[in-house]
Amino acid sequence: MIPLSVLDLVPVRVGDTPADAFRYTLDLARHADEWGFTRYWMAEHHNMTGIASAATSVVIGYVANGTKRIRVGAGGIMLPNHSPLVIAEQFGTLESLFPGRIDLGLGRAPGTDQVTMRAMRRDPRSAERFPEDVAELQAFFGPVTPGQAVRAVPGAGLNVPLWILGSSLYGAQVAAHFGLPYAFASHFAPDALMQALEVYRQYFRPSAQLQKPHAMVGVNVIVADTDDEARRLFTSLQQRFTNMLRNQRGQMSPPIDDIEQYWTPAEKHQVMQMLSCSFAGSRDTVKRLLDAFIEKTGADELMVSGAIFDHAARLRSYELLGEIGRM
């Protein structure tokens, strides 16, 4: 099995607070560290009551401080929301505190809606400068040059590993141009997956960071002791995506016995298309499905999101997934 990593959106369950979500995240990260997962990433989202990772670099520090081996990082930081200097300083600080364990994945989406974008004082045109901002960020992490007027302190000379995130051909082209590893968000936007991987591999240019393409693919995985139990746990994620279609974003809901009573046929079709890179079942079932998916995509690594309401069931899912990774 190829390397497996964890994507944790730090979900806030119905009846819980963000403080509860942070405690569950750290507990899962400590277990993932023990179970042999490669990375533990969190993502920048804003104004979402069901996701607690808005201050992503702060949460990364919290998780890195509570773990020992696993790489911890952002999957990702939405770079147009920030100046490259500030991100270089934040992740230079993290790399200084936890050397050799920090990843920085970069996206160009806002991570929120238009109203919240205005509250963040984001320039709507900032996404157009994404490649230039990536280059500027790389320079801040590189060695200080003679006469350099502005430097990231800490950050300069630390060469924090950068990743490009995306769900379209654009991100694949940027990653290939800079010679950076590429993570595709097929766990919620799978339509362009195969074409994006082809573009990335075809146009990849070796760099100081990476000599050959490295593609990480996002998937939703829920593993339980039986197929029926896993399918029931999966209904929490199915409800979340249905609610997104209804423009009803909220906290994570508990699983239900009959998802067919929850969504309309049209909603079911759209949600299951968005969740087509999702695998729920027993350990043997998921192993078989993941093997076929890896063969199809040629993925070098899987970034696994496991949105499960019950914390104990979530731990069990990743424990079983860790066993799959060792099979």
Image (tube, helix red, strand yellow):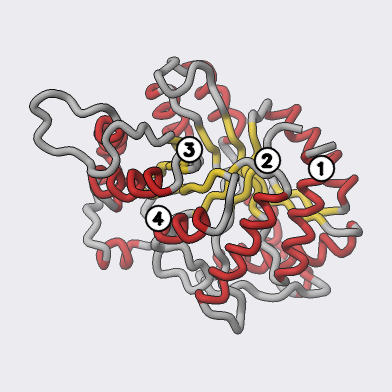
Question: Do the residues under discs 3 and 4 have CB atoms within 8 angstroms?
Answer: no
Residue in view at x 46 percent, y 62 percent = 53
User: Would you say residue 291 is visible in this rendering?
Assistant: yes
What amino acid is found at the position of numbered circle 3 in the picture? Gly
Question: Do the residues under discs 1 and 2 have CB atoms within 8 angstroms?
Answer: yes
Give the residue number, with chain letter if any, for mark 4.
Answer: 57
Badge 1 or badge 2: first in the primary sequence: 2
Question: Do the residues under discs 1 and 3 have CB atoms within 8 angstroms?
Answer: no
Find numbered disc 1 in the image and state the secondary structure of the residue it sits on: helix
Residue 324: which numbered mark, if any? 1
Residue 247, position in %: x, y?
50, 70
* Disc 2: CA contacts within 10 A as few (<14), some (14-19) or many (>=20): many
Q: Quadrant of the C terminus?
A: top right
Q: Quadrant of the N terminus?
A: top right
| Front in this rendered view, residue 119 or 115 | 119
* Disc 3: CA contacts within 10 A as few (<14), some (14-19) or many (>=20): some
Horizontal side of residue 258 vs 161, given as left or right: right
How many angstroms separate mark 4 from mark 2 (CA)? 22 Å
Give the residue number, with chain letter if any, for mark 3.
Answer: 100
Residue in view at x 39 percent, y 36 percent = 160
Badge 4 or badge 1: first in the primary sequence: 4
Badge 1 or badge 3: first in the primary sequence: 3
Give the residue number, with chain letter if any, for mark 2.
Answer: 4
